Image (tube, coloured by chain):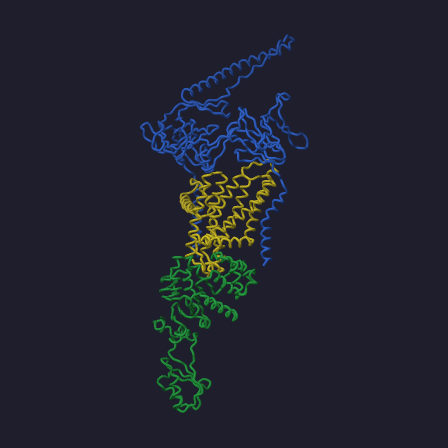
Chain colours: A green, B yellow, C blue
Amino acid sequence: MIRTENLCKKYEKVEAVKDLSISVEPGEIYGFLGPNGAGKTTTIMMILGILKPTSGKILVFNKDLYSDYFGIKRRVGVVSEVQYLYEDMTAYEYLSFFCDIYNVKNKKEKIEELLHKVDLYDRKDDLLGHYSRGMQQKIGFVRALLNDPELLILDEPVSGLDPTGIREVRDLILEENQRGRTVFMSSHILSEVERISHRVGIMNKGRLVAEDTMENLRKKLSSEVEIELEVDNFDVEAEKRLESLSFVNSVTKEDGKYLVRVKADKDYRGDLVNFVSAIGGNLKEIRKREMSLEDAFITITEKNISLFSSGEVSE
Amino acid sequence: MSYRWTVIKSIMKREARSSFFSLGLYIAATIACLVSAFIFNTYINTVEGNNIMVMASPLNTPLFYAVIVAALYAAISSSTALSREKDRGTLEVLFYGPVDHLSVILAKFFEDIISFLIIMLLVTIYFAYAAITTNLGFSITYLYAIILSIFIASCMSSFGLWLSSLTARIRTSILLLIVVMGGLLGLQFLQNYILTLKPENLSLSMVYIMGIVSNILRVIKWVSPFSYLTDGINAVALGSVSMYIENMIGAIIYTVVLLTATVYTLKWKGVRKL
Amino acid sequence: MRKTCCISALILIFVILSSAIGFSAETPKSKEVVYSLNVWDGKDYAAPFYPSAYDTIYVMADYENVYSVKETLVYYWPLTREYMADWDGLNKDVGETIEVLKGNEIIGTYKKVDYVFYYPKGYWGGGTQLFTGDKAKEKKKEYDQAVNKYWKEVEAYYQAYEKYNKEVEEFYQNIQEGKPAGKIPQEPAPPTAPTFYVTDISKAYVFSLPPGQYTIRTKDKNEEIIPGTVKNLIAFSHRREGIGYNIIPESKWTYPEVADDSSEIVYQYREGTLYFQPYKEWEFNELYYNKLSKPQSPGRSDRWIWVHMDPVSNVKLRIYSGDSIFSEIRNRPYYVEQVPGSALGYNIKLLDRKENPYGMADFSAFKFSVPPTGDYKLVTIDSKGDIIENSDRYIRPITVTDARNIFIASLGPLIIGLVIYIIRRVGR
């Protein structure tokens, strides 16, 4: 759906995007992650032709945007972080205007259907200037869906929304994805991306530092695994012996439990159980602690940039 | 081109709607009518005082002022057309969809002309009232002047759009318009003053300076939309067909050049809200 | 910043001072070869001259014009902003032939000929005619003879008057002495001076040219072009002929209006009387015509002006109301009678020769009392009964309404706008 090759965008002193190569496959939800200023929006603007790349190549629907500008744009729906609306228009007039631009047939039915879907049908004749932030966001979604786009590009779609709004938008994205639309979603709210994305690309300082499925990403990012142990009859000597095991990196005690960091090359839970029973300990609980994407994100962007930028993780 | 035309029509329709529902257009038309009312009143006073007044096309003088007001409205409206949308972020949103630079600019331009025509329609209705109640009557030159005024408005509008493409804030646009328009008007007055000076009256150094200024002004004449306004009105007043056609062609070339410049400036400056 | 301001101020002061010096400096006289012309302007002969500052000469096509090539002292007169010639200081004829070229081809070579100007109604009477060659000599001879005859008549008159004085003296003496006095002596009538005038015979190049753009140059006896004599020459003609009108409103007879072009409408206040004085008129290019008589005059090449010629005779005015003839008017003499008493005013009255055989007309014109309503069209009809081209003018009575209505109506667009705006806002 979207493919970029060595995409670069340089401003006078800043390199906003460097050698970005990503690929968004049909039917997937692609989470485009990164902290503020990472270059996510710049990338989206380049994909939409609003910003001109300094170098590199962008293909949308396997075509250069300018080879069929109007044709490609008609197959894309875009929702931005802030909905810049014509505040002197009513919701219906606004949507009708975009229906005209997209040359949508049966526009009245289409608008009414979508407004019903986002529970704004009753407010369709209100001026957009009187809409709340969440309502404006919904109108942005409706506008993006008017033309039944094959590709939805969402730039920080839940930013600034209350929890209810976030849930509604999330449901909407999932629903549209289930209806066959490919979603390319940028966000800095990791939990949201984590929940709905099939694949994730992580940007930092203009570079793509990781791109993979959630599962693989977690695996690749973890050089060690944290295992919680709740054991009785475990003295200081036993703790030292545990620490001296070849696959154990460190042991800390938190709230009466031991947090054992072991190497991630295999599952060492069996070895730990054997060890505890060997020293006469009474094992009450053993649990592998999962690494959230947030942890991964922080790990990638803050701690291990050098590691990933060398290409060890990014594929 | 056909799809672009669909886009142009859609944006133009929205803009026209917005103008129709805002007060600016009606205020401009009212100012135009009010200025004309003073001239009609002068006519009445003249006829009352002298018992006779001989005039070829009495509606042309008030029309001249009405066109100035309407064309200035076109310039002001167009000078904020792009910067306003840029300032509010709505221009960026348009570009999310199948909208390109040319279609936005053409849509804004055509909408400006439509607004101008609405003003001129209101002015003409008022003129019809004044002409009928006073028995001043219409002449065919009024029609010629109205037709030519569209080309004059196109110059003003394209000039305003170009200025608008240079800025990203409404205030900056208006300020730029005032400065540029004021400068151009000032230069035009200077040109008229220079024309009255005889080189024989001046010292050599002054003649040299005047020569340079005059050459600059000759170039600026092609840049200033006001020169098309005054030339157009002169063409109608003189009844010069060649000057009339020359003015029309000049205005079309001017408009095309300015609109092209606007497209490139907008591409260069970008459409994103800063 | 301050430095820039200071430099700018100094430059400004320099510019102002230099221009002031330029204005105050006296322009010196310079010796130049100039063309001094007598050109027909449609009514009379004007006498422009073309120093080196002007490179184009304007003349009326198909009329004989007089060209003199002189060496003189030229100076600029700042008060009137024009070039002047000090003919008293230097006035020397130069050149032997004038050549006129169309492109590079010489289309005429002219030698100096004798010429006179003939003024049939005296020097100030207009209708000037140009005669050249033998006819000039004949006219001059005719004038000289008339003048000689007049002086002889004057001499005879003085002798007769002397005789008359003596007879009057004798007549009164006889009465005083009681002698029969006889008939009262008749005073001799003074002779009438010639009403026409003919100038002295002069020599110059006299020729006419068809309309077009030419180059003119003067050669000396060695067939060499005299420096400064090569100039452009534009011979132009009128574009249209028509009838112009002086219009005298009855209420302000000393403030006549002029309606030169058919597009001009005569607006009349309520019912009133207008007096029309039709003139023959020709339409010329404004720039050319202005330059013709004064080369320093400004003008626009894209503007056309009507120039009044002589009043037309043997015509009548016809007034149309719609397509039907409303009335036909003839030219009549009128005089202005002041109203005596405290109420200042006047009446314009028809001068009836039967009632007032010695009365003097203040003007003659075609009188039309404009009805209070309806539009009218005025045309001039020639002696054959045909409408003269470009003689039509529309006359419209203007309805003076309350000016407040005009102002109130001008607020119409704002009211429409407010209604739309309020409906839009209230509706949401």
Q: Position of residue C308 (x, y in %)?
A: 51, 30
- Residue B102 vertical placement versus C123 (above, below): below
- Residue B231 vertical placement versus A175 (above, below): above
Task: Report the front residue among B121 and B208.
Answer: B121
Residue at the image position 55 percent from the left and 54 percent from the top = B21
Q: Position of residue A115 (x, y in %)?
A: 53, 63
Task: Report the front residue among C52 and C417.
Answer: C417
Q: Is residue C14 visible?
A: yes
Q: Position of residue C215 (x, y in %)?
A: 37, 32
- Residue C370 vertical placement versus C401 (above, below): above
Q: Position of residue A214 (x, y in %)?
A: 41, 73
Q: Residue lying furthest top in this view?
A: C180
Quarter of the figure with residue C217: top left
Please count the marks in the image.
Answer: 0
Q: Is residue B84 visible?
A: no
